[in-house]
Amino acid sequence: MTQQESLFYEDVYDVLKAMVQAAGGTKAIASRLWPHKPIAEAQRELLDALNRDRPRKLDPEETLAIMRFSREAGFHGGKHWIDADIGYQPTAPADPKIERDRLADELARAADNFKNLQRAVERMAALRAVEKA
């Protein structure tokens, strides 16, 4: 299900708020960002971080986590806002099946490469054994 995206966000704080809302709200996201904190404390911290006038700011890893959570919820406005803000064309989200297939292919190539390397090491060991004899 795709969340409705606004055509305009005033700034990064507006788009962060939209991502948090799309991904379940401040309580849900705060508990995912900081599971070791009491929920009420984590929620207050997130609300502070989403307020441009407060000193608490999200670090890059926290921001990326929120972007992932919003992507999981079908909301792509954050990524598209960043694209537009820095001068890129918005792109569609990657299809997880295509990424899975790409990774499987890469893993198969790596396994084949490992087998080839293992055979080369075995040949070198055999040659050394012959040289010593």
Image: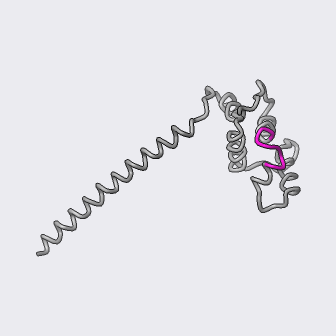
Residue 55, how many percent across, how many down?
Answer: 85, 49
Left or right of 30, for residue 63: left
Q: Judge whether residue 87 is colored magenta.
A: no
Quarter-wise, where is residue 68 in the image? Answer: top right
Residue visible at 86% across and 48% down in the picture: 48
Left or right of 112, for residue 122: left
Residue 84, how many percent across, how many down?
Answer: 68, 28
Quarter-wise, where is residue 86 in the image? Answer: top right
Relative height, residue 126 to residue 41 (above, below): below
Residue 45, how many percent across, how many down?
Answer: 84, 53
Residue visible at 61% across and 30% down in the picture: 92
Q: How many marks?
A: 0
Front-most of 11 and 130?
130
Relative height, residue 91 to residue 28 (above, below): above
Front-most of 107 and 44?
107
**Image quadrant occupied by the N terminus:** top right
Residue visible at 56% across and 40% down in the picture: 96
Residue visible at 52% across and 40% down in the picture: 99
* Residue extent of the magenta highlight: 21-28
Q: Residue furthest front?
A: 1
Front-most of 53 and 111?
111
